[in-house]
Amino acid sequence: MGRKTRWWLLALSLLGSVTAHAASPVWAIHGDHSTIYLAGSVHLLKATDATLPPGFDRAYKDAKAVVMELAIDKIDPTVMASWMMENGMLKEGATLRATIGDERYRRVSKEAERLGVPMEAIDMMQPWVVGLQLVEMQYMQMGFDRQSGVEQQLEHKAQADGKPISGLETLDEQLGALQGMSNADQGRFLDMVVDEMHDVAGETQSVVNAWRSGNAAKLAALLSEEYKSFPNLYRVLVSERNKRWVPQIETLLHGNQDAFVVVGALHLVGDGGLLDLLRRDGYKAEQLN
């Protein structure tokens, strides 16, 4: 798979872009009576490097409401746990070893041990869940956490300021995208995670630093490579969700209230990205400095 595939690990938790000019990963789109700010998010950041780009400040101040992939202030941890128990576990009698095979299980076990994840804690999980667990533990060891991420920061600000938060999709729609992958694709996803995590640390910080002044063209080029390497994963993680979100964003554009829409930056660019889909529908996006 090589270097290019490692960008999928960023797609799961660190969605950003690479740049050589001073712009923000925030675009303004004007409707007849409202402005919708569309921002690329980095879901995890280090506490020591958590300041958001200036474009975020402008968009947040102008907006009367915040829209995220999920309305995270309304997610009940017990509901999340219940969903995972119902949808993320193997069927009764099945085991991870039997599902993914002895050699793949050996490699996953070695990686889990390195990350401090007991195999008994994941032996009954579906492969896609195991992959997400390993990715999250890898980034935690690198010093990244969700509490410092873009969404968590905006959630705290919005709650303090009394600004409503809504979501573009439900928990079932978001996690169900991965849960619905075939067994073969889940195994391939798990292989990718195990193969590529060791090389992520050296590249991640430069990606996060560059995200602060997003270059859509460069990110689109990376997406093009990834589409070729694993089109099914790109489809369920990015393109199908984009198609579900565009009508909701256009409804906001037809309204009378400015809103700040924040999604993973990989959703914004490239063929079939939100900016492209909105452009096809006649909307023009202006990137903020």
Image (spheres, grey):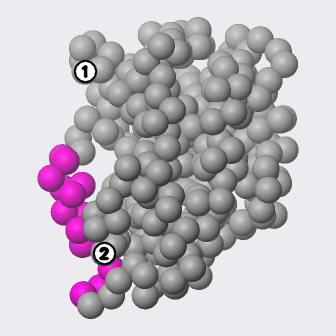
Classify mark 1: helix, strand or loop.
Answer: helix
Residue under numbered circle 1: 159
Mark 1 crowdedness (10 Å alpha carbons): few <14, some 14-19, many ≥20 = few
Badge 1 amino acid: Gln
Q: Quadrant of the N terminus?
A: bottom right
| Quadrant of residue 87 within the rendered picture | bottom left
* Residue position for label 2: 124
The amino acid on which the numbered mark 2 sits, given as a three-letter code, is Met
Which residue, as the protein is rendered here, is positioned at the far left? 78
Residue 247 location, x and y as percent? 54, 50
Left or right for 202, reference 147: right
Q: Nearer the viewer, residue 6 or 178?
A: 6
Q: Quadrant of residue 228?
A: bottom right
Residue 31, can we see it? no
Camera-nearest residue between 151 and 192: 192
Residue 55 falls inside the magenta stretch:
no
Magenta-colored span: 76-92
Residue 104 as seen in the image, left or right of residue 286: left
Asked if the magenta segment contains residue 78, the reply would be: yes
Q: Residue 71 at x, y = what percent? A: 33, 40
**From where the camera sits, is residue 184 visible?**
yes
Q: Is residue 142 left or right of residue 9?
A: left
